[in-house]
Image (cartoon, rainbow, N blue to C red):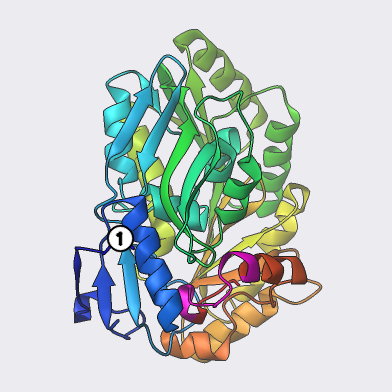
Amino acid sequence: MTVVEHSRPGTAGDAIDGVTPVRVAEPSSGRECAAALAAAAAGGQSTVLRGGGTKMGWGRPVQSVDLVVSTARLDETLIHRDGDLTATVGAGVPLGRLNAALATRGQWLPVDSAFAGATIGGVLATNDAGPLRYRYGTPRDLLIGITLALTDGRVVKAGGTVVKNVAGYDLGKLVTGSYGALAAIVDATFKLLPVPHTSSTLRAVYADPDVLAADAGAIAASQLEPLAFDVGGSDHWSLLVRFASSPASVATQVAAARALLRGDVSIMTDQEEAAVWAAQLSLPWHDPGAVIRCSWMPSRLAQVLALVHELRTQCDVTLIGRAGTGTGLLRLRGSEPALAAAITRARLDASPVGHVVLLHGSRSLKTQIDVWGAAAGAPAMALKRALDPTGILNAGRGPV
């Protein structure tokens, strides 16, 4: 069996929810990664997979961690097939570094993350997506091939390296969004897109949330094709609509969208536009007491805004969401009892939002409120038993 050469004792800097792992392994190949996982399985060692470490606080509180397997050394862009608009990328490659390299060929992986150090493996493991989700979907939708290290010591591949080859694509879909509970991602192959020539963003500010919801519905029902389509706020609400294409197409769509919006409208380009979308990504994570992710039917946006108004009687609430796809984040600030009460209210059957997951919160809050909100179903547990039969992965952090 291959020996993991790069291994060291865990330190306070490796801690997960205040729990320091016994050891940290940094394999430099898929074989080394699989060997580390097989050894951990044989020894019954609770194991957590780590990319850039930007989301290590997500998930249920851990009691103990024997091993952290880091992808820090799986950090190469293996091959960029610019003619096919695909690239195969090591799990440890930061998303920002990848897109900087792809930009030299006029291409990009249209995924945005709020976390500067987010890696390809971590983005896939959490299915992390921002405003670009409206046009391009989540990382799962852009994935066409994947290499995994399993706890039985095998390295397996699924999918292909060109867009038309989708054999085995379902395995990539299953692992994406599994939070490291099924297997370690070694590398991934994505379909890429050309970088748009130009873009502009309309921001419409509203005092009346019902008018915003109606305008969002008008944009969604139109023939317009935004790159991103977001909502945000708590007292006054903003609707952000971004168009990116050729200069003529952008100008035409901006004019048509402006005619549909009844709020106080401004148009942004260049650095001002980049700044507003950077703020849209980062705002939920500015000094939060808790951050919850939820989803809703886009047609129920008015009810979602009413829920936010109701929750503000319990704590400070800010919504940042995808108006066109019906998903978003709520940043909550207040006492722990108030945060717990707000999350419980959001999860009621009568709530307009569903799939309420506590992403960020104190260890104490996560002992009061289950992070995932519901137990994993039988199919998910069967998949867990098939890929991680000894149950070592993710140290009970979930979702399976």
Q: Quadrant of the N terminus?
A: bottom left
Q: Quadrant of the C terminus?
A: bottom right
Q: Nearer the viewer, residue 297 or 304?
A: 297
Vertical comparison of 144 with 175: above or below = above
Near mark 1 (Cα within 10 A), the count class, few <14, some 14-19 or many ≥20, is few
Vertical comparison of 65 with 35: above or below = below
* Residue assigned mark 1: 2
Residue 356: percent from left, percent from top? 64, 69
User: Is residue 389 a member of the stretch shown in magenta?
Assistant: yes
Residue 217: percent from left, percent from top? 73, 39
Whether residue 343 is visible here, answered yes or no, is: yes
Vertical comparison of 13 with 1: above or below = below
Q: What residue span does the magenta drawing correspond to?
A: 385-395
Residue 354: percent from left, percent from top? 71, 65
Q: Nearer the viewer, residue 280 or 12?
A: 12
User: Is residue 303 a member of the stretch shown in magenta?
Assistant: no
- State left or right for residue 355 relative to residue 388: right
Query: Could you tell me how many numbered marks the image carries?
Result: 1
Q: Nearer the viewer, residue 263 or 271?
A: 271
Whether residue 51 is visible here, answered yes or no, is: no
Tell me where residue 184 sits by quadrant.
bottom left
Vertical comparison of 62 with 180: above or below = below
Q: Amino acid at mark 1?
A: Thr
Of all residues, the one furthest to the top in this rendering is 248
